[in-house]
Image (tube, rainbow, N blue to C red):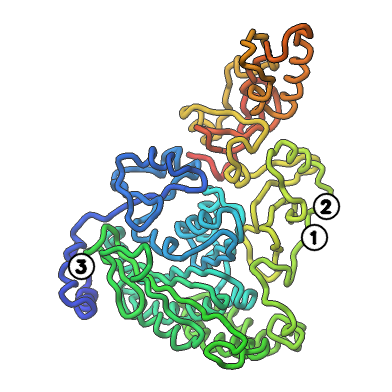
Amino acid sequence: MRDLLPERFCAELAVTFGEEAIKLLGSYDQPAFAGLRYNTCKLTTEEIGKKAEGRKQVPWAKAGYYQAEEEAPGKTLDFYKGLIYIQEPSAMTPAEFLDVQPGDHVLDLCAAPGGKSTRLAEKLQGKGVLYANDISASRAAALLRNLERFGAGNLFVTAESPEKLATCFPEAFDKILVDAPCSGEGMFRKDPSLIRSWEEKGPDTYAPLQKNILNTALSMLKPGGYLLYSTCTFSPKEDEEVVADALCNNEDVEEVLLSEHPLFYEGMLPCAHGIKLLPSRIHGEGHFLALLKKKERTSQGVGGETPLDRDETAKLSKTSFERNSTALLDDAISGKRDSAAYLLREKDLLENGRKRGNADRYGSESASRKKPNRPGSAASAGKTPATQTPLAAWQEFASLLRIGIPAENLYEKDGHLYLLPAGCEVSRSLRYLRTGLHLGDLKKNRFEPSQALAMWLKKGDFDQEVELSEEEAFRYLRGETIELPAEDFGDLRGEVRDLPVENPGDLRGETRDLPGDLRREARDLQEASRDPGQEAGAQRMVFSARKMPNKGWCLVLQDGQPLGFAIVQDGRLKNKLDPGWRVL
């Protein structure tokens, strides 16, 4: 493959890396590395160990493992159950090196197709909120599917430009990940077609866009917050120079040395700003990482200066927008981007916002008395909360859930019901693909649960569950109706067994895992069958619970992991898997 590399690319590597360039060029004749990452929210460490038996672990990823290129994990039940994400080993580093904690407000700015977002969602452990964004709506749709398959619920998925998000969320996020679009030099070995793209649009094309994205992202970072910038390319123009530009234009931002990070691996190469992962040094295709921190503001401000008030901050934000939008406007006019009209409209709003009633949004005196918007906050709320809408059908379905769904966090729009992250609402000004966890749809007098809800639930969270074999699971995923054996149905049965007096007890152990109605029935049967003359604990009722309800909604499981919903009817499992999730 080395013969396919452009001469200009080889020359630039020689200038950048010196003698290392010889080894780096030689690595292009070696096979590419492939990997997968296990879902730590659905699998325990022990379960991951069993599934990964025989695989080599990726040194810098908690649940990342190498896989052979000929494997096809994307066609396995583990993939459809959201237990694995297929991801190149080097690409696992950005989300690992960003120290996301449960409860954080996190932004993944260039998130599609979702490998890094799914890992960030795992780190949040269902607390806080993840904003996953991609400017392309089609790419954001793929991002959403991957997040929902992984069981993420505390999220917002948007398809917006960085500038649009920045107007809504100034200094709002604790952690931000910017895996910027780039020339893809680290992907040549995996996808040789990218070589032609590099010849047409190399580092000189991407660097201005990357600088704009990074500077804009920093305006959304809270004081004390961290931003990780990454690319899958080796060019200093797209890597070190972009970071240097951000440090120059943002005096309140400093770099954090990743060479001192606990996950730093001996094959990673420190550079002027950040670190590089080179395929000549590690088992991966390559990546660049740089970690930035926005300095805390004290009573004296950053660096001892007087802290900026809201109006001054707004003026600086306006200047930053005008500076960063220049390159994008040039690209749009030349046909490289299709957002010229949008950018011009936003610039006009910035200049005339006070006259149009947008003073609070763009930094008026009244806004100076308000706190910055939190991600998903009620700065400009959307539809009426669902708690004000008749939801009898949802409440009937929710009675089957063994976990609580806070009514105050429900949000309904056009018949779709969502569970918003705690404390968050929906902004009218953003283009959402998902607002929180999609619970399902309200249709006249019935509620139909969503596939996202099924993937979010865990075994034991639903009153009525059914386990399928591997063969039945694939049939279910193809949308088929499943005929179940007659012995899987029937009434609750009980038998009296004589137990030694030294083993006293009641039905707690035998009925603990039964649905509420069956537990009540079991207790009634026990009381009816108990011999009053017998010593307490001398006998007890043992029940064999039916595997399936006779009718109604059930959660379909395979090996204890949800696949979707179904309705039990006349001894059949009526498939309710969303057609868009079916396996062809």
Q: Residue at position x 30%, y 64% from top?
A: 286
Residue 425 sits in which quadrant? bottom right
Contact flag, marks 1 and 2 (Cβ < 8 Å): yes
Residue 387, how many percent across, how many down?
81, 53
Q: Which residue matches tag 1? A: 384
Q: Residue at x 53, y 52 (%)?
A: 145
- In-image side of 551 versus 21 (left or right): right
User: Where does the image place residue 415, in percent across and percent down from the top left?
Assistant: 75, 51
Q: Earlier in the sequence, mark 3 or mark 2?
A: 3
In the picture shown, does residue 365 fall above or below 150? below
Specify which label sits upstream in the sequence, 1 or 3.
3
Tell me which amino acid carries mark 1. Answer: Thr
Q: In the rendering, which numbered label is found on residue 10?
A: none
Q: Which mark is residue 24?
A: 3
| Residue shown at 39% from the left, 77% from the top | 206
Q: Residues within 10 Å of mark 3 (few under 14, many from 20)?
A: some
Q: Position of residue 538 (x, y in %)?
A: 68, 11
Q: Can residue 157 be seen?
A: no
Q: Is residue 35 visible?
A: yes
Q: Secondary structure at mark 2?
A: loop
Q: Amino acid at mark 2?
A: Thr
- The residue indicated by pointer 2 is 389
Q: Position of residue 410 (x, y in %)?
A: 74, 53
> What's the distance in space between the residues labelled 3 and 2, CA to CA?
62 Å
Residue 60 quadrant = bottom left
In three-dimensional space, the C-alpha distance between marks 1 and 3, rounded to whole angstroms, equals 57 Å
Amino acid under label 3? Leu
Nearest the viewer among 125 and 32 is: 125
